[in-house]
Image (tube, helix red, strand yellow):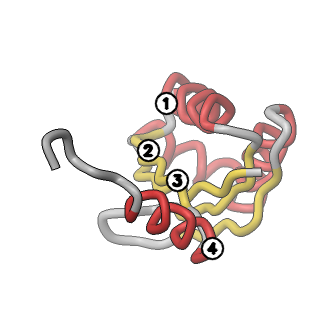
């Protein structure tokens, strides 16, 4: 499973929905969405300021993450950013691969 950071800011419609339904209900909707895509919610936090919502989720792949982003964006609830996350061990693999790279002409 791949790990993703989702950050969001509510639209006017999204903020009104949050007022009506509360934060726990919204978290439940997110959990159900991620499960339907074969994933799971690791953590879910509200904030205030420029970013209203932070989530870390495990999803099978980039296609599932893109699907989650599209579903939320299409709902009109807000504006979302998705960041793929990776482990230190994965960075070790990337660094090793990068060490073998030779630019054309080298």
Q: Which sits earlier in the primary sequence, circle 1 or circle 2?
A: 1
User: What residue is shown with label 1?
Assistant: 73
Cα distance between the residues tagged 2 and 4 = 28 Å
Q: Which sits earlier in the primary sequence, circle 2 or circle 4?
A: 2
The image quadrant that residue 4 belongs to is bottom right
Cα distance between the residues tagged 1 and 2 = 7 Å
**Residue 78 pos. (x, y %):** 44, 40
Give the residue displayed 69% in from the left and 52% down from the top.
2
Q: Which sits earlier in the primary sequence, circle 3 or circle 1?
A: 1
Q: Is residue 89 above or below residue 37?
A: below
User: What residue is shown with label 3?
Assistant: 84
Find out whether the residues at labels 2 and 4 contact each other: C-beta distance under 8 Å.
no
Q: Which sits earlier in the primary sequence, circle 3 or circle 4?
A: 3
Q: Secondary structure at mark 1?
A: helix
Q: Which sits earlier in the primary sequence, circle 1 or circle 4?
A: 1
Work out which residue is located at the far top of the displayed protein and give it: 74
Find out whether the residues at labels 3 and 2 contact each other: C-beta distance under 8 Å.
no
User: What residue is shown with label 4?
Assistant: 89
**Residue 5 pos. (x, y %):** 55, 59
Q: Secondary structure at mark 4?
A: helix
Number of the front mark, 2 or 4: 4
User: What residue is shown with label 2?
Assistant: 80
Work out which residue is located at the far bottom of the displayed protein and give it: 88
């Amino acid at each position: 499973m791949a790990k993703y950071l989702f950050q969001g800011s509510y639209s006017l419609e999204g903020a009104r929905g949050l007022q009506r339904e509360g934060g726990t209900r919204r978290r439940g909707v997110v959990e159900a969405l991620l499960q339907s895509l074969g994933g799971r919610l690791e953590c879910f936090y509200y904030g205030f300021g420029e970013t209203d919502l932070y989530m870390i989720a495990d999803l099978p792949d980039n296609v599932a993450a893109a699907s989650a982003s599209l579903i939320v964006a299409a709902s009109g609830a807000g504006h979302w950013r998705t960041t793929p996350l990776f482990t230190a061990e994965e960075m070790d693999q990337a660094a090793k691969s990068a060490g073998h790279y030779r630019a054309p002409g080298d």
